[in-house]
Amino acid sequence: MSKISDRLNRLSYSQTFVMSNKARDMKAAGIDVISLTLGEPDFDVPQKIKQAAFDAINENYSHYSPVPGFLELRQAIAAKLKRDNGLDYKPNQICVANGAKQSIINVLSAIVNDGDEVILPAPYWVSYDEMVKLVGGTSVFIETSIDTEFKFTAEQLEKAITPKTKVLLYSSPCNPSGSYYTREELEAIANVVAKYPHVTIISDEIYEFINYEGEHVSIASFPQVYEQTAVINGMSKAFAMTGWRIGYSACPEWLASACDKVQGQMTSGANTVAQRASITAMQMDPSELQYMITEFHKRRDLVFELMKDIKGFKCNLPKSAFYFFPDISYFIGKNLNGTEIKDADDFAMFLLENAHVGCVGGVSFGSPECIRFSYAASEEDLREAMKRIKDCVEKF
């Protein structure tokens, strides 16, 4: 008898962290590795947010907070959602969690029964499918491709919905593709979901502000699905607060109460100092973050031009987030320097071991023919990484 539960045995390790750890081990061994694996801004937290954390320590915010978060933070989040997204939420509809990841698992735990279906448009963030397994659900995948900017359509969604469907889970802007859904695309999706009141949308909007073209639209802004939607967001990406672990969900009251119940038995309230600092983050005007967005935009354009010259890479121009997700199917089935390339994970490992550039294979993203690069790195590293890859694939 295994000491590990069957439920846990069904899970995979996060491929993002597997490749990141491998790159870290190689660096520790003295190998000059450029790691473009993690989705983490390479900027410091804005000073006013750090000062709010210092103030919170000095004001002795060291005790338990309410499970769904301090009222002042939930009020600030509600004000932000109104200001930036045109969404009306009351503080009791918001649950602050230990990162956006916990916010998603809270919602899934609250509504998914064993055997319920969760629709995941591929590519999807690596943890989505594993979360579905963890709560006993069954993932149903909608396939997309680079030719459609990795976006699913309302028609595809309607074909995927069954009486067992409980959730549609997606991100916009999208990790890993860097695509985002337009107002028109989201309205068409909303019109489909509105016909199926047993379906809940989980809309992961953590990359909301990192958008270079067009506007960010939340699907919850369409009244026909407001009561069917859980909006997920947090502090990690726009405010470079990945290690502070503050995310949140904004939901209909019945679902917010259920998330509060789940979290109360799992972790209780999030870090109190980080919560107090997040009040300041929520009150910042988005224009104060523009310096980061401008730099990401510049890096995106640089990498796109360099990547176009790499043999066998088919890439589109991502319009948001800070990832490239090129199609490398040209290399699948080939033998490169003694390595048989069966899928994108093999190719990612080949690049790490031969070009000393870390990326993440697309198998765990639901796209076994693609690899993900983060361009949240210095221009110097990005130029060198693309040169190493180009030289490596041409050599072999």
Image (spheres, grey):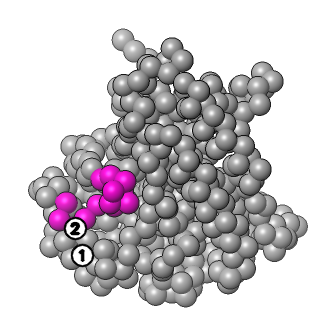
Residue at disc 2, secondary structure? helix
The correct choice, above or below, for 105 with respect to 21 in the image is below
Quarter of the image where the C terminus is located: top right
Taking the image as drawn, is residue 261 in sight?
Answer: no
The correct choice, above or below, for 331 with respect to 114 in the image is above
Q: Nearer the viewer, residue 269 or 228?
A: 228
Q: Nearer the viewer, residue 122 or 203?
A: 122
Q: Residues within 10 Å of mark 1 (few under 14, many from 20)?
A: few
State the count of labels. Answer: 2
The correct choice, above or below, for 61 with respect to 31 in the image is below
The correct choice, above or below, for 43 with respect to 276 in the image is above
Q: Residue 192's x, y, as percent?
A: 19, 71
Q: Residue 19's x, y, as percent?
A: 58, 33
Q: Which mark is residue 188?
A: 1
Answer left or right for 201 relative to 331. left
Q: Which mark is residue 89?
A: none
Residue type pointed to by label 2: Ala
Answer left or right for 337 relative to 129. right
Question: Disc 2 marks which residue?
Answer: 154
Answer left or right for 154 relative to 389. left
Q: Residue 136's x, y, as percent?
A: 30, 41
Residue type pointed to by label 1: Ala
Q: Residue 271's x, y, as percent?
A: 68, 58
Gap in angstroms between the C-alphas marked 1 and 2: 6 Å
Residue at the (25%, 65%) spot, across then down: 153
Q: Are marks 1 and 2 in contact (CB under 8 Å)?
A: yes
Residue at disc 1, secondary structure? helix
Task: Provide the residue span drawn in magenta.
Answer: 144-156
Q: Earlier in the sequence, mark 1 or mark 2?
A: 2
